[in-house]
Amino acid sequence: MPTALDELFQNVPQLPSLPRAVTDLIDSLGKEDANIDNVVDNLSHDPNLSARVLRIANSSFYGASRKVGAIDDAIAMIGLNALRTLVIASGVSSAFKNIPHVDLKAFWQNALVVAGLAKRIARRTRGKVNPEFAYTAGLMYRMGVLMIHAAFPTAAATIASECKDITVGERNAIERNNLRVCHAQVGERLATNWRFPEEIVTALRWYADPADGNASDTARVVTLAAQIALDNTHGRHTDEIAAHLPQSALTALEISADELIDDIASVADMQRDAASFI
């Protein structure tokens, strides 16, 4: 018998897919010996993606000191890891079009802020969490929400009206009550289908339940990043946001809320940079 998750995927009019250049880079995540020539060659065969990547590389998001005119220039300017996450971000965000009741520009701006925060927080974990994995998981943390809107737009609109987004776990509970499945499970399935590394798949599944025994440290980093972004949206001040962070995530990562004050204060700058990315 199909599960609620199976039914959701069957109900999506067209499942999102990724360009070959993006899937190849997903395969290389976490590997320091990725072949740069292959990266350049794959992107050269996708002119639309290449143009988008170069536009972003030249934006204030990356703060290039000179104009970047080619993919190999972009690698030299911002580094392979940054280019890899840029291409994945560009490919994933372009995979979703015309989602009912969703402002996609606002959605991806929020995702980029969470991704940037997750990367910063990961660097504070003293090697516990790979910053590149944290960034990618942060970028995709609510990808399942888009799938729910695509599959069940009326139910998704009801969920959106009920959810106040006070905590990262709130939306999951409302989704389960309405659909018997939550966006974290949907994101896990989609990331698995797209062959993302297991660390990212697990982070998407458990970021909203940081105290669960299945939650990984990467998931908990995304928890903190997402909660900071939510609280910022609600107009909380920096000290209020720090006080509202889930203690279970902080304890597991062996960091304090005080260590994240600078990251919390950086959200406004991240929002401006994200606007130039979209």
Image (cartoon, rainbow, N blue to C red):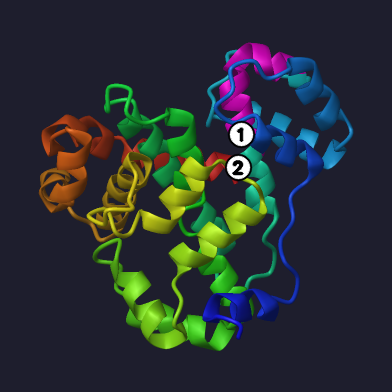
| 118 to the left or right of 150 | left
Q: Which residue is the site of mark 2?
A: 89
Q: Amino acid at mark 2?
A: Ala
208 to 117, vertically: above or below: below
| 6 to the left or right of 110 | right
Query: Where's residue 142, x and y in %?
Result: 47, 59
Q: Quadrant of the N terminus?
A: bottom right
- Element under label 1? helix
Q: Amino acid at mark 1?
A: Leu
* Residue segment shown in magenta: 72-87
Q: Residue at x 63, y 51 (%)?
A: 93
Dot 2, how many residues are within 10 Å of its Cα: few (below 14), some (14-19), or many (20+)?
many
Query: Where's residue 118, x and y in %?
Result: 37, 39
Q: Which residue is the site of mark 1?
A: 86
256 to 232, vertically: above or below: above
Q: Residue at x 30, y 67 (%)?
A: 165
